[in-house]
Amino acid sequence: MSLHPPALSLRPWVESLWAAPARVPGEQGGRTREWVMPDGRAHLAIRLGGQPLGLYRDLDDVQARWISDAVLAGPHDRAYLKDTGQMTGSVGALLRPGALHALFGVAEPQLLNRHLPLAEVWPEAAARLVGQINAAASPQAQIAVLEAQLLAHLRPARALHPQVALALPRLAQGLRIDELVRMSGYSHRRFTSLFREATGMAPKRYACLRRFADALPASGKPVRWVDLAADAGYSDQAHFVRDFHGFAQMTPQAYRRAQRQGVRHVRAADIPPPPTQT
């Protein structure tokens, strides 16, 4: 995957733009799936070649729900299961808190743990964007097309509330939420409301999720979970394991044993092909 910085006027809302090549498809006859680990950030993805995103409720679900080839994904606080039977290339944007409103007119809490066809928020532009990206001659040209559409849809939205903008990096540094509330001058309820409006989550949930995401080890790296828990700021390993399971839908041990494509993509149980008729 190649990452590119967005235009200056997009940077308050867009962390990066990406172009990803196609991945090796699943074995002939069956369907492969993977868990996508949450990190609390929304994103926009255009899947090349018209292949829609397919999602499953859980491992027992064998009928994918097909969304679209242009998908707006809200912030997630738990892993989701997607179809990887045909992993085409993609072009997309990783979004910052507040971007769903600034670019798509959607409140962050409305899209928590949801995927939405882009056509529902960009009814006229979505099909045009998909066509132009698929017709572009290179990944750089594809990213330029996407960036132009994001710039065209950037509405005169107000910036993040100053106290939320201050709180986000301080949470990453490990500052306690009650201290952030005190520094803001707001009541705990008001501060939580402002924070949820920007991120889709309450401050405690968001902080725990970001701590989890930062703790995920690089693929292939040897792991001592007790050290990882301590490095991520957990006071005890049991607390870390409990949070890990809640976010990842699996234990740290299962994550470690799984076949991984990078940090956030974990191979799940395949759906076997239907039995051969005799």
Image: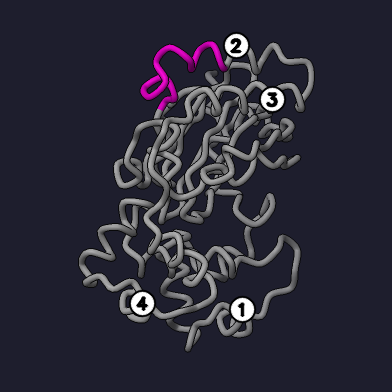
* Circle number at residue 228: 1
How many marks do you count on the picture?
Answer: 4
Q: Which mark is residue 174?
A: none
**Residue under the point 42% across and 37% down:** 102
What type is the residue that disc 1 sits on?
Answer: Leu
Percent coordinates x, y for residue 10 in the rendering: 57, 38
Looking at the rendered structure, the kind of residue marked 3 is Ala
Decide: marks 1, 2 in contact (CB < 8 A)? no
Question: For the C terminus, which image quadrant?
Answer: top right
Disc 2 residue type (three-letter): Gly
Observer-nearest of 269 and 138: 138
* Spatial CA span between label 4 and label 1: 30 Å
- The residue tagged 2 is 131
Name which of mark 3 and mark 2 comes first in the sequence: 2
Q: Which residues are magenta?
A: 117-129
- Assess whether mark 2 and mark 3 are in contact (beta carbons under 8 angstroms): no
Which label is found at residue 183? 4
Which residue appears at 63% of the width and 40% of the height? Answer: 8
First in sequence: mark 1 vs mark 2: 2
Give the Cα separation between the discs numbered 4 and 3. 41 Å
Question: Does the magenta portion include 221?
Answer: no
Q: Which residue is mark 3?
A: 144
Q: Looking at the image, which residue is at 48% across and 77% down?
A: 240
Report how far apart the C-alphas of labels 1 and 3 lie in the structure.
Answer: 39 Å
Tell me which label, 1 or 3, sits earlier in the chain.
Answer: 3
1 vs 3, front mark: 3
